[in-house]
Image (spheres, rainbow, N blue to C red):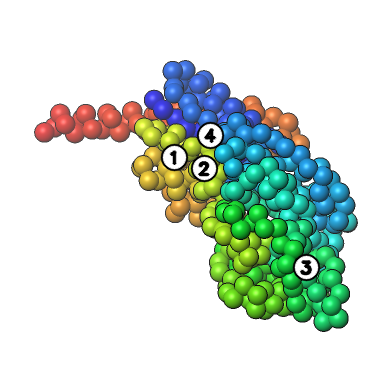
Amino acid sequence: MRIVIAPDSFKESLSAVAVAQALAAGVHDVIPTADIVCVPMADGGEGSLDVVLAATSGERRTARVMNANGDYVDADWGWLGQGSAFIEMAAAAGLEQIPVQQRQPLTATTYGVGQLVSHALDAGARRIMLALGGSATTDGGAGLLQALGVQLFDKQGKVLSHGGAALQHLDSLSLDALDPRLAQVEFQIAIDVDNILCGVSGAAAIFGPQKGASPHDVAVLDAGLHRFADVCARYVHKDERNVPGMGAAGGLGFAIRSFFKANILTGVDLVAGLCGLDQALQGAHLVLTGEGRMDAQTMLGKTPVGVARCAGRYGIPVVAIVGSLGDGYQAVYSAGITAAFSLVPGPMSLDQAVATAPLLLRQRAADCLRLWLAGRQGLGGLVQRSLKKL
């Protein structure tokens, strides 16, 4: 019996690898001879680099780059060999790196992400996979362009400062110093939302508040993104602002798609391809997946739904074991998840749940396997009884 275990991490609790190991232990408690294939997953947000490096035997590299606030930090990225690099933008410009009281939404920059791209170019990258989840920025990717040689000017010919607010004053740009190596690079940008760049469903309006933006800040940032898109269109002779997904990561994908060769895909699909999920599903009887919290937002490109979509191509049932079930989680059933269960057996504090998460995951996996086996046996008995009546 082949069982595939493909969970995401449980944020601030367990890595995807640790979650998979705990679930596998529970399966073995019930079916010691099961053929278990663990495929730790991610959706393009934080933790994606760790999962990809583990699956591909890639090389972790570290670079000193600017974070969203302009301070220098050590950021990891992955060299996968054969001209391929994997960059998790949150490593350089991630929201979780910046304490709430220190977030600067108007000046937050993706400059450090551009620096990581430059390091990948130095290593010989010709394909750069860029996961866009977890950003602290709303600069449309202007910072990334600045790090790669694009110069942005106001009406007086002065170089613009970093951040989305400065884009209101953008008047022109120069591509003269753009790194020429980028002409030979193909980007794969992984997104988990379909928001456009500007307006009421754009990067500033939808995601700005969670990055510390006040209503006034949101208006300033949105105006800057509109202006940035207007100016960019003059130079690249195309306008990408209304392409679904351009609002991801504060508009970072907009800059990449506007100036470089780039393909858009979901974070789950990118990670699944690198981790070999499709191959693992061949001949499987059951899939176990999970994440820290399952709710209505799980439908927005999160790992369990992505895994279910892949498993659905083969008609394999998918059971999700999660940290907690929130409002609207039932929507995942329409996406191909057969059943969803919380690992918490009863009232307990968050600290207790985190501390005992490996044991709880093991127990819930065993419970689910017992129920699944009972269903299979019951169905088999029903078939046999029906045949005897013929």
Instruction: Measure how far apart labels 4 and 1 are at the Cα level.
Output: 10 Å
Q: Is the Cβ of the residue at disc 2 closer than 8 Å to that at disc 1?
A: yes
Q: Is mark 4 on a helix, strand or loop?
A: loop
Q: What residue type is labelled 4?
A: Val
* Residue type (three-letter) at the residue carrying disc 3: Gln
Q: Name the residue under label 1.
A: 278
Residue tagged by mark 2? Answer: 272
- Label 2 to label 4, Cα distance in Å? 9 Å
Q: In this view, does 179 lie to the left or right of 266?
A: right
Label whose residue precedes the other's in the sequence (3 or 2) = 3
Residue 26 placement: quadrant? top right
State the image coordinates of residue 264 (x, y, percent, origin top left). 54, 58
Q: Count the marks: how many?
A: 4
- Mark 4 lies on residue: 39
The disc labelled 1 sits on which kind of residue?
Asp
- Residue 332 can be seen, yes or no: yes
The Cα atoms of the two marked residues, 4 and 3, are separated by 43 Å
Query: According to the image, label 3 marks what residue?
Result: 151
Q: Where is residue 80 in the image (x, y as percent from the top left)?
A: 61, 38
